[in-house]
Image (cartoon, helix red, strand yellow):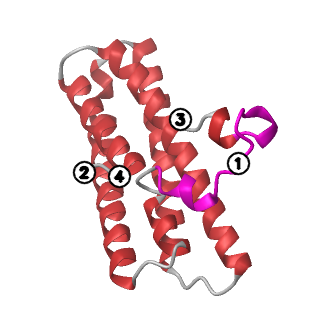
Amino acid sequence: MTSPLTSGPTSWRGDPATTSLAARYAAAGLLTVAAILFLGGSHDALASALHDARTQTAALDLDLARVDGEIDALSATLANEVTDAVESARAATLSAEEALAGAAEDVTDATDEARTALALSDAQVALEAAAAQVRHVRGQVGSGAVGESLTELLAHLDALRLGEG
């Protein structure tokens, strides 16, 4: 989701204008929470964004448990790849849950703001990587229960990282 054109040093870009942190945060769903926090959004808007993101993480937890129960139907090699992808998604979900918990706390100074921004950004990167890995194994699995569960897992990962849903 990031690009050297927007995330790299200004020397890499043709346009030397800096990209504000707020503009980057507004680009993705999980980071909607950060945008609301740092752009001074209302308490209701923050509560709504946190609720939406937490709903997606809860759905991810269910998807992960469902895939765990279906992996035995796959060949050993494919099962290992799916297990790796599921563990990546599990770690990304945990990272998102922890970042959201931190965002729900009061941000009282610049240090808190930076810590929260970093946690949300790290969670976004983890979600991006997990989604790519799940998408890869989803293409290898084909149809069936595991394929359907991976499709649902991917939809919820995308909903959390892109703000769809």
Task: Decide: few, some or many residues near mark 3? Use Cα within 10 Å; few <14, some 14-19, many ≥20.
Answer: some
**Nearest to the observer: residue 8 or residue 118:** 8
Between disc 1 and disc 3, the foreground one is 1
Q: Position of residue 3 (x, y in %)?
A: 61, 34
Q: Which residue is mark 3?
A: 129
Q: Disc 1 residue type?
A: Ala
Magenta-span inclusion, residue 62: no
Say whether marks 2 and 4 touch (CB < 8 Å): yes
Cα distance between the residues tagged 1 and 4: 27 Å
Q: Disc 3 residue type?
A: Ala
Q: Quadrant of residue 43?
A: bottom left
Magenta span: 8-27
Q: Which residue is mark 2?
A: 165
- Taking the spot 33% from the left edge, 35% from the top edge, the residue there is 154
Q: Position of residue 91 (x, y in %)?
A: 52, 47
Task: Decide: few, some or many residues near mark 4? Use Cα within 10 Å; few <14, some 14-19, many ≥20.
Answer: many
| Disc number placed over residue 17 in the picture, else none | 1
Q: Position of residue 71 (x, y in %)?
A: 32, 27
Cα distance between the residues tagged 1 and 3: 28 Å
User: Callout 2: helix, strand or loop?
Assistant: loop
Q: Which residue is mark 4?
A: 163
